[in-house]
Amino acid sequence: MEAKKENIPAGFGQCVAEMLAARILNERAGDANLVIYATVTTGSIWQFLKLEWQVISIDLSEYYLKDVNKILGILASGIR
């Protein structure tokens, strides 16, 4: 999810709505995976979210593009 106007917290609502929609689509397709991961980013700053059951977790840390290896590690392994 792209953060508009460089405002990551303002993107959380839309991101959560998309996560819930993804879960519904997955359930209808027979995918029982109950964990959905997402990110809100300005392109230079990244924040990660996780939807598990009915709980949304937001990693309060901001990750910067200069730490691209850390961002790629999170994307590869899921939210920490």
Image (cartoon, rainbow, N blue to C red):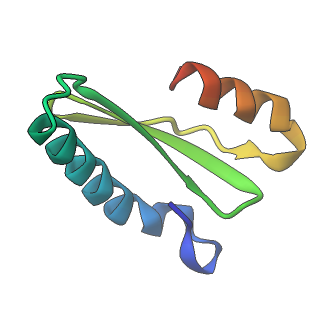
**Which residue corresponds to the image point at 45% horizontal and 69% vertical from the top-left?**
10
Q: Quadrant of the rendered structure where residue 69 is? A: top right
**Which residue corresponds to the image point at 50% horizontal and 60% vertical from the top-left?**
1
Q: Residue furthest bottom?
A: 5
Residue placed most toward the observer, 76 or 49:
76
Relative height, residue 32 to residue 64 (above, below):
above
Q: Quadrant of the rendered structure where residue 70 is? A: top right
User: Is residue 60 shown left or right of residue 51?
Assistant: right
Quadrant containing the C terminus is top right
Relative height, residue 59 to residue 43 (above, below):
above
Residue placed most toward the observer, 21 or 39:
21
Q: Residue furthest right?
A: 66
Q: Locate residue 43, reporting x and y percent.
A: 72, 61
User: Is residue 23 shown left or right of residue 1?
Assistant: left
Q: Locate residue 9, reporting x and y percent.
A: 48, 61
Q: Quadrant of the rendered structure where residue 45 is? A: bottom right
Q: Locate residue 35, reporting x and y percent.
A: 30, 27
**Which residue corresponds to the image point at 31% horizontal and 57% vertical from the top-left?**
18
Relative height, residue 72 to residue 23 (above, below):
above
How many tags in the picture?
A: 0
User: Is residue 56 shown left or right of residue 40?
Assistant: left
User: Is residue 2 shown left or right of residue 57?
Assistant: right
Q: Locate residue 22, reporting x and y percent.
A: 27, 47
